[in-house]
Amino acid sequence: MAPAGLAIALWLAGGKTWRLALEWCLLFGVGMALVVVTKVLFIGWGIGSATLEFAGISGHAMRAGAILPVAFFVILKGARPGLRGLGVVAGVALALLISVSRVQVNAHSSSEAISGSLLGLLLAGIFLYRAGAMRELVLSRTLVALSLCGLLLTPNVEPVPTEQWLTELALHLSGRERPFERSDWKLAQRHPLFR
């Protein structure tokens, strides 16, 4: 999803809508920053909720919620309003399916996936509101086609070790020797001095 977020910025910049491209980058950056902060707080200090099983906002759900509706909107900007709206709805539906899949594969709890989806969809909604007010949004079809071809290659690219980087950052900032884990919640409940 992150390469798709970058592609959206490139599409907007290529269409000479610099302000909108900057707004997209800022919104997406805020979303990513919130994901990172919540994960670092949990890994380094155990800040989360054992009751809600919340150890940080799901980055996958947030990125899907932010990117997919926006990507469909931008690609279909010149289409009839009904088709563009249908594209946004399809983007929201796909984002929600990705969020559900994160829970199904036990990568995240429901609270983490829901918070990620809500944050991503909120950011997408803000962007769509801002972009909808713009009359001129011209996309370079060549740039869109090239970036879509590039996105097709991303499943074959080696994943970036972001979880490892987050863990290293959290341990460095907190001074802990090992990351806080969900199992530590149970230990802390049995032994309050563990904290």
Image (spheres, rainbow, N blue to C red):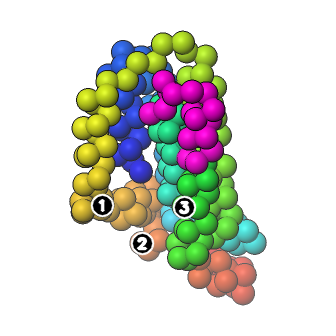
Residue under pointer 1: 155
Q: Is residue 109 left or right of residue 68?
A: right
> For the residue labelled by badge 3, is the local secondary structure a helix, a strand or a loop?
helix
For this orientation, the residue located farthest to the right is 51
- Work out whether residue 139 can be spotted: yes
The range drawn in magenta is 75-91
- The image shows residue 32 at horizontal and vertical percentages of 49, 45
Image position of 162 with respect to 134: above or below: below
Please identify, in this view, whether the residue under mark 1 or under mark 2 is nearer the observer: 1
Residues under labels 3 and 1: Cα distance?
A: 15 Å
- The image shows residue 186 at horizontal and vertical percentages of 67, 83
Disc 1 marks a residue whose amino acid type is: Pro
Of labels 1 and 2, earlier in sequence is: 1
Residue under pointer 2: 177
Marker disc for residue 98: 3
Disc 2 marks a residue whose amino acid type is: Glu
Please identify, in this view, whether the residue under mark 3 or under mark 2 is nearer the observer: 3
Within 10 Å of the Cα at label 1, are there few (<14), some (14-19), or many (20+) other Cα atoms? Answer: few
Residue at 29% in and 37% down: 145
Residue at 40% in and 34% down: 8
Q: Relative to the observer, which residue lies in front, 110 or 79? A: 79
